[in-house]
Every structure is written in C-alpha cells, then in structure tokens.
Image (cartoon, rainbow, N blue to C red):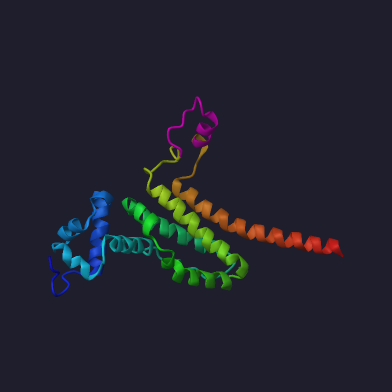
Amino acid sequence: MARPSKPLISRAAAVAASIEIIDSEGLDAFSLPRLAKHLGVRAPSLYYHFADKTEILQAVARQIAGAGTLPRRKPGPDWPEYFVTLSMNLRQSILKHRNAAPILLQYLPRDLLIGTYEDTARFLEESGVPARLHVQILDGMERLTLGAVLTEAMRKPSTKNTIFPNVDPHSQPLLARALAENRMTSRQLFEEMIRSFLHGVVRNAEVEVADKSELSVSAH
C-alpha cells in the first residue's frame, strides 16, 4: 500500500502514542498496525518518520530517558548532591513507564547522554573535582543508575520488608531479621547507593594521594 503524499501525523505524536500503548497494554501488544490504529491512520503513514519498528523503539527509549530534568544546583563542595538528584530524576522518569524497561535496556544509545555528560563534566570541573576522576564518575553513574533502575522497573514494586522477596525466617533468619530492621524504601536505598558511590570515589582518590605522599617522604 502506497503511503499518503503528505504526512498525516507528527513524529512526536507517534512516539507519545507508542509509549501510551506500551504503558497500558504491554510491550508485546505494540506493533506498527496497532500504533497506526491508535493514531487513526494506516501503517504506511508511519514511514514518513520511521524506517521500521526498531527506529520507533529507539525513539521511545530516547524520549523516556531524556525526560529527566537537570538539577538546579551551583557547582561547589556539595557537588555529589547534583548527581544524586540527577539520578533520582531519571529513576522517576523510567519507573513511570515500567513496561518500557526492556526497550531502554536494548535500544538506549549511549550518545543520547553525551550532551548531558559535557554539562556534568563542566559541573565537576567548576566544583573542583580533578579531571582524572570525571570518567570514573560519569561512567559509574551511568552503569549504576541504569542498571539499578531498569532492574527495579522489571520487578514488581516492593515495600521495605519485601525488597528481598520470599524470605523464610526459619531457613534464612539473619536475612529475615535484616528485612525486619530495614527502615529504607527502594527509593531511599537507591539514593544512598548513588551518594555512597560518589563519596567513595572521592575518598579513594584522597587515600591514593595520601599514600603516594607517604611513599615520597619515606623515599627521602
């Protein structure tokens, strides 16, 4: 079937409709015919904006991952909180669309975040963080944030006491006790994981510098 001579829909409308279908009906329900029906057009109309289904899913991944807002925080000694907020914003954006988690895992291109990385590298520099730590921080933040959030999105939501499901207090008494004593939600655990990573990078760097200074003094 030939496509119309003029586009009947916008690219943004197609992406928004795709997300709506995936959110409400699940990823398995998504297809080009289903999307076309949802938009009230015929499938060939979609080819004005997308080469195939894969390109649509890539656009969906970009839309969801790019929806997180940048924190409004000035560079300074409390710079880790900028990244904590940045990660929390991305987590919130992804968890709004749990059914789309496999799409982000498969189709989210790293270059989507490069523009953000330039901004965050500048933020690190202006905060006085040594350039030799920037890649470690940026790469680690991406791996921790996306890995943790996508894993969380593909699981059922948990409470403080069901973060580890199906724990048997008889055969696993220590873990059961730990869960009973836990006071942190999944959100709070994620937040502290990011914060601990960032402070850990700085602490390790300071220890390395101190060790080198001691060796230098000892050598003389």
Q: Position of residue 43 (x, y in %)?
A: 17, 62
The answer to which of 101 and 160 lies nearer the viewer is 101
Q: Position of residue 76 (x, y in %)?
A: 57, 69
Identify the residue at the far top of this view: 170
Q: Is residue 72 visible?
A: no
Left or right of 195 on screen, residue 65: left
Q: What residue is drawn where x is 50% and y is 62%? A: 83
Q: Is residue 89 left or right of residue 22?
A: right
Residue at 47% in and 28% down: 168
State how many labels appear.
0
* Picture coordinates of residue 2, whole percent (x, y): 13, 68
Q: Specify whether residue 22 is painted magenta.
A: no
Q: Position of residue 173 (x, y in %)?
A: 53, 28
Which residue is more in the foreground, 95 or 113? 113
Q: Which residues are magenta?
A: 164-179
Question: Which residue does the image show at 85% across and 63% down from the upper left?
Answer: 219
View extreme (bottom): residue: 6
The N terminus lies in which quarter of the figure? bottom left
Tell me which residue sits at (50%, 54%) in the image: 144
- Residue 33 image-quadrant placement: bottom left
Q: Is residue 195 above or below residue 79?
A: above
Q: Quadrant of the C terminus?
A: bottom right
Left or right, residue 69 beside residue 212 = left
Q: In the drawing, does residue 73 fall left or right of residue 57?
A: right
